[in-house]
Image: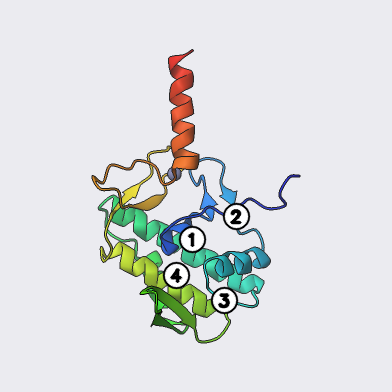
Amino acid sequence: MVPRYPEFRPGDILATTFTGTLSERQGEPVERLPSPERLVDWLIWQHLMVSFCSETELADAKRLRESIHLVATAAATEEPFPQQPLDTLNEFSAEGQAVAVLTSGAELEWRLKSVSVRDALRVIATDAISVISGNRDGKLTVCASPTCRAAFLDTSRGRTRRWCDMNTCGNREKKARFRARNA
Ligand SMILES: [Zn+2]
């Protein structure tokens, strides 16, 4: 059976997993959040318990997503931050309400003030700020795939990771090299 929607791509970092809901930005883009319902599914999958999403909220989420993408890319390539996306990121961080909770398992968990998308987007914006400001272990890098170029946080020991995702971008590159060798 063919799935009705493109699948979500898993990831360890909330902010870049979110930007990964649009992939192949430099090729033929794959939109993994084609409807408000899919955004609700994605947020719940990330333990951000929202109950409903409107078309406007989906548009807001995509505005935040592309802003994170642009600012993170600028950070990864050591360019100045583009002003408008930076303002958007900060705007989403300032709005919405969520509190950080420490669980007995020593993990950070976000508890949304309500079940609204706006509160969930605040959590994502906060995560993006923490990643882009260099507050996390890892180095922001741009994916080596020419059709992807997604910014991701390289947490490998030697900071030698080249692809945002081994299963997609990395695998494709390996296959392309194999084909080139055997042509
Ligand atoms: Zn990639």
Viewer-side residue, 66 vs 105: 105
In this figure, which residue is indicated by the disc labeled 4?
A: 124
Judge from the rendering whether residue 8 lies leftward or rightward of residue 20; answer left or right: right
Task: Calculate the distance from the C-alpha at mark 1 to the C-alpha at mark 2.
Answer: 10 Å
Q: Residue at image x 45%, y 18%?
A: 180
The disc at residue 161 is none
Q: CA distance from mark 4 to mark 3?
A: 13 Å
* Element assignment for label 2: loop
Residue 171 drawn above or below residue 102: above
On the question of residue 147 being in view, the answer is no
Q: Position of residue 25 (x, y in %)?
A: 50, 47
Q: On screen, 169 above or below 10?
A: above
Residues at discs 2 and 3 in contact (Cβ within 8 Å): no
As drawn, the label of residue 18 is 1
Mark 4: give few (<14), some (14-19) or many (20+) Cα within 10 Å.
many
Earlier residue among tags 2 and 3: 2
Q: Quadrant of ligand 1?
A: top left
Identified by mark 2, the residue type is: Arg
Q: Type of residue at label 4? A: Ile
Question: Quarter-wise, where is residue 107 in the image?
Answer: bottom left
Task: Tell me the quarter of the picture where residue 75 sits.
Answer: bottom left
Task: Name the residue beneath numbered marker 3.
Answer: 49
Asked which colour scheme the image uses, the reply is rainbow
Which badge, 1 or 4, comes first in the chain's sequence? 1
The answer to whether residue 75 of the structure is visible from this angle is yes
Tell me which numbered mark, 4 or 3, is placed earlier along the sequence.
Answer: 3
Q: Name the kind of residue labelled 1 in the image.
A: Phe
Q: Secondary structure at mark 1?
A: helix
Camera-nearest label, 4 or 3: 3
Mark 2 to mark 4 CA distance (whole Å): 17 Å
